């Protein structure tokens, strides 16, 4: 009889659930940040249920047995520290789990802005009946930055309601089944001049930090709306605030920020044309159960020696949507 | 040379526009409410650009030449007074113009509620970062009450984003191309027990007033949300307020009310689970130009003796989506 593998789970504030089948095949050690190193000692597998925790670097000295790390998140920007990247540890993420809620958040944020629901909600809270026209989103043009699983699902949902969508990714291509045309992200400044919606669902990597810089922001037409459900640091927030405050940009729907929680004195809170949401775009319905079930499925594959889905390219910083040449 | 027809236009506060081709074929008399009778004297056609005006009954004595009345609205409940109904005057409405904005309003209202954007906007205005989960709308169940042009368009849009839709109309049927199944409105109380969204886009008629009465309201599950973009008097507002205030109904998105503007002291203003909008669901983008262009198209048909589209059945109180047996 072979030794049972050891699976460390970093739990955090939200109790982990639904790992019964893992526990049937492995010794599961549920840990909090201060005892993560003890849990890691001899563990082959680490499940980061507390997906935003920064505890791993300090416990890395105990991770000598680690072969596979699964994180219950899509973005791995807070996770990929140099020793992990340099190691042979396979990293997988919650690939696919967030596609539907993220796509619906983007569509909902677009409709929220198009129909003026933010200002109308403000008038409601004042008890004021102030008629105003809305806009239709059918026929408008969206650029979706990020061509992974979430971006593709978002593009398909927007197309289903009549929005004209193109994609922005690492490399330009013309035959994409979700986007039709994909532009290279290096062309962003040149191509945003006639968009209605600039939608960010890209991962944060050294290559995408401030991808939407002041030049891109300034190239947006006054009627455009920025929707950021990716990462705050994709955007030069100061440049965004400058145009929004000047009233030369129609609005923004923001779920992610350079600093989270968004500081209480940040100007984004009080701009009526902005909807600020607290990094919740990916969280809907059974997401916690789905995250646990996904790890369990992956663990059964791992235990059987099968290939894992959702493997992060640690050099790129995300799960490539197709093999990198 | 034949006499040019006379077209009276009730203008109201918003200037009428784009009737150049009508003016080329007819004598166009632009009137305000006090001089509507003078404009009607000898007029064969009346265009109610001021679509909510109640001025016509008082001027009806001068409408002896009137053959056709076109109103720049979908609902004709405020228009159909007994003398008009009893007359031979053909009534047409703005059939089709509002399909897209209304459908998008309904979808936007559903996503607004599902993602919690109302409460999140309130927290934003307090500068408070308060994470909360959303819901997905894909896979949820909507009943769309109203099987006319707007209802059918709404059903198709909701289906495109994965909502399971059925219709509610005058008569039950099983083979509808937009709804699949259509239930009879008399069955409403019995069938709402498992809906997520009860969507009202029906016309207000003697048959639909308080169609959603206290019994229907009370049959809704606690997780349900009412979306009313039809008319306020479709709903027993007191029964709705009672359940919302008790917290036993998830929410409501309301664009129409029994009394409009909604009175300043009405409890609907201050329920956080409700989005109150000021009867604007149908108003988006080029709607005013579209309304004028539609009348112009119809006038050219009328002048050529061709059948008119969007003819209201004055006994039913709306444009039937298919011939009434």
Image: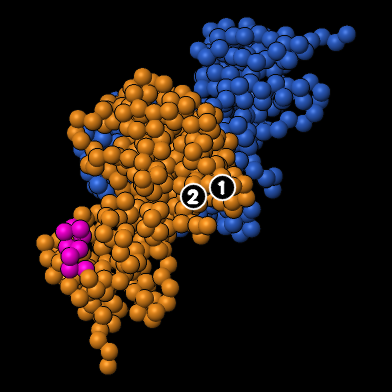
Chain colours: A blue, B orange
Q: How many marks?
A: 2
Say which quadrant the N terminus of chain B sits in: bottom left
Res B138 quadrant in image: top right
| Secondary structure mainly formed by the magenta segment | helix
Q: Earlier in the sequence, mark 1 or mark 2?
A: 2
Q: Position of residue A24 (x, y in %)?
A: 76, 11
Q: Do we see residue B223 in this rendering? A: no
Find numbered disc 2 in the image and state the secondary structure of the residue it sits on.
loop
Residue A139 position (above or below residue A236): below
Judge the density around disc 2: few (<14), some (14-19), many (≥20) Cα neighbours within 10 Å. many
Q: Chain of mark 2?
A: B
Res B9 quadrant in image: bottom left
Q: Is residue A247 left or right of residue A318?
A: left
Q: Which residues are magenta?
A: B55-63
Residue position for label 2: B147
Residues tagged 1 and 2 counted as in contact (Cβ below 8 A): yes
């Amino acid at each position: 009889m072979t030794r049972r593998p050891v699976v460390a789970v970093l739990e955090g504030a939200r109790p982990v659930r639904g790992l019964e089948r893992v526990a049937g095949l492995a010794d599961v050690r549920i840990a909090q940040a201060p005892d993560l190193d003890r849990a890691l000692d001899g563990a082959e597998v680490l499940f980061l249920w507390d997906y935003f925790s920064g505890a791993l670097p300090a416990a890395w000295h105990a991770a000598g047995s680690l072969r596979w790390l699964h994180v219950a998140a899509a973005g791995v920007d807070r996770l990929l520290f140099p020793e992990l990247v340099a190691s042979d540890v396979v990293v997988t993420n919650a690939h696919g789990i967030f596609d539907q809620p993220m796509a619906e958040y983007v569509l909902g944020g677009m409709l929220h802005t198009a129909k003026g629901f933010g200002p109308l909600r403000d008038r409601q809270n004042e008890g004021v009946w102030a008629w105003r026209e809305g806009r239709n989103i059918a026929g408008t043009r969206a650029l979706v930055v990020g061509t992974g699983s979430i971006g593709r699902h978002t593009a398909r949902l927007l197309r289903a309601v009549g929005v004209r969508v193109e994609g922005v990714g690492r490399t330009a291509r013309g035959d994409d089944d979700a986007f039709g045309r994909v532009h290279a992200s290096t062309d962003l400044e040149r191509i945003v001049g006639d968009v209605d919606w600039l939608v960010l669902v890209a991962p944060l990597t050294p290559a995408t930090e401030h991808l939407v810089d002041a030049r891109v922001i300034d190239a947006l037409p006054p009627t455009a709306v920025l929707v950021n459900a990716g990462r705050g640091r994709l955007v030069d927030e100061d440049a965004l605030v400058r145009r929004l405050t000047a009233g030369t940009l129609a609005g923004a729907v923001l779920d992610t920020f350079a600093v989270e929680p968004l500081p209480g004195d940040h100007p984004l809170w009080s701009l009526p044309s902005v909807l600020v949401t607290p990094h919740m775009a990916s969280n809907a319905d059974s997401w916690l159960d789905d995250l646990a079930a996904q790890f369990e499925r992956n663990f059964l594959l791992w235990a059987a020696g099968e290939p894992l889905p959702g493997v992060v390219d640690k050099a790129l910083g995300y799960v490539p949507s197709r093999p990198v040449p």
